[in-house]
Amino acid sequence: MKNIVIKFLALFMLLAFTNVSANQSTNESTGTNTHKEETYKSQTFGHMVSGFLKSTGIVAFISPDPDELNAKGEKMSTFHKGLGRALMIILTFFLFWLAIAKGFEPLLLLPIAFGGLLANIPVANIGGAHGFLGVIYSMGLSNEMFPIIIFMGVGAMTDFGPLLSNPKTALLGGAAQFGIFGTLVGAVALSQYGIVDFTLQQASAISIIGGADGPTSIFIATKLAPELLGAIAVASYSYMAMVPIIQPPIMKALTTDAERRIKMTTLRHVSRLEKLVFPVMVLTLAILVLPESTPLIGAFMFGNFLKESGVVERLNDTLQNSLINTVTIFLGLGVGSKLAADQFLVPQTMFIMALGIVAFSVGTASGVLMAKLMNMFPGHKINPLIGSAGVSAVPMAARVSNKVGMEFDRNNMLLMHAMGPNVAGVIGSAVAAGVLISLFQ
């Protein structure tokens, strides 16, 4: 028995020794391999300092890498790598000034401008596929998710009472959509004469900028012209943020002093049942007539239905506050990522920006002129200033109508009256997008 135990212990020790030897051989082999794969070479202190200086942003601006690639993996021009980036960074600081000093829609303008600043940092490639701005853009803008969530939040913040109490103001929201279809015709005409080279689908996606509705612009661009999504998103949200700059001169040019002083009154009280039925009715009509528009209209009416139900205050509060605020941050940064010099300072984007401001201006003017036309008929007079709110930049356009009205009469509160055409414009732009998608997709 004693001999058996001794033999067993000897065998065990032999196996253990063999295992240790094998491990040592593996470690040595691994160490050898690691040593072979090591690429770092010893450098003098002077070489290290020189390498660090070459990697700084100052050198990247003054003497950019000739082989530097943009976010799409394409070679960049010398202009875009140097002066172009500097110009875009100056532009982002100007946008900071507008948002902070002038108060022009800071909730939109600050994230967009900061995203543009980050996108123009050399070397870091923050807007690339693996940069965090590129990831934000891919996860929410290119797949339409952010616009849908924004529409839910806007719906939860919307009160259809002013529209239901004075239904004829919906005509102002409809008239403002003329900017969309007018710009579509103009873009196609320019393409026919060879001035620009936009397909019918691309012209349709660009024209929706006239509705001043960022989420809708992104939605239609992903369907009809995904290659123009970045430029269209930048143009649409830039003009939304600059509503206080663009609209007032047009409003004042098309109205008289007496028209700006017209005071409006609430015509009737809107019951809770009406407010509950309205979103369901609008969604039902969209399903039956224009199902292409139901993603946007459905999200918008869902948010409003939660609010008007009065039984899900926690969900309503989340949509109105934390959810829409979070998405606005990401959406602004994602849109700002397309302010990179190599994507913004190109002829195509410049044409889109130009067509966009024409569309937006025509939409604003159409709403004001429609209000003047309606005042020629008997009935309650409409202050033409609220016609400009027919574009669907909600609630920015309504606030501008109220602000301009109060410049001429401090007691003339137009905000709630302007919300009628404003929310009608949201529905109108979504319907217009559905029409264009159904015709041209």
Image (cartoon, helix red, strand yellow):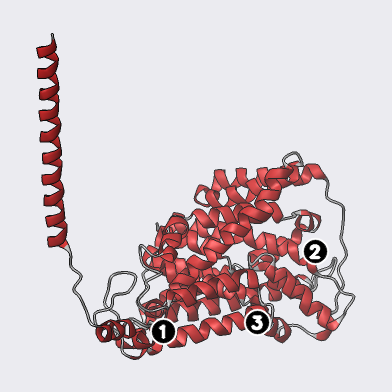
Q: Which mark lies nearer to you, 2 or 1? A: 1
Q: Quadrant of the C terminus?
A: bottom left
Of the pair 349 and 153, the residue shown nearer to us = 153
Circles 2 and 1 in contact, beta carbons < 8 Å: no
Considering only order in the chain, which callout, 1 or 3, is on the residue closer to the N terminus? 1
Q: Which residue is mark 1?
A: 85
Front residue of 130/258: it is 130
Q: Left or right: where does residue 102 sit relative to residue 134?
A: right
Q: Which residue is tagged 2?
A: 416
Residue in the picture at 69% in, 64% down: 422
Binning the other alpha carbons within 10 Å of mark 2 as few (below 14), some (14 to 19) or many (20 upward) gives many
What is the residue that sits farthest to the top in this orientation? Answer: 1
User: In this orientation, which residue lies closer to the viewer: 181 or 63?
Assistant: 63
Tag count in the figure? 3
State the image quarter where residue 105 is shown.
Answer: bottom right
- Amino acid type of disc 3? Ile
CA gap between label 2 and label 3 equals 21 Å
Give whichever of 28, 278 is nearer the camera.
28
Q: Can you give x and y, in whole percent of width and height, for residue 289 in the image?
A: 55, 47
Residue 426 location, x and y as percent? 63, 60
- State the residue at coordinates (68%, 85%): 249
Q: Secondary structure at mark 2?
A: helix
**Residue 242: x and y, percent?**
62, 77
Judge the density around disc 3: few (<14), some (14-19), many (≥20) Cα neighbours within 10 Å: few
Q: Is residue 11 above or below residue 122?
A: above
Q: Residue furthest right?
A: 411
Q: Is residue 209 left or right of residue 59?
A: right
The three-letter amino acid code for the residue at tag 1 is Arg
Mark nearer the N terminus (2 vs 1): 1
The amino acid beneath tag 2 is Met
Q: CA distance from mark 3 to mark 1?
A: 25 Å
Residue 245 disc label: 3
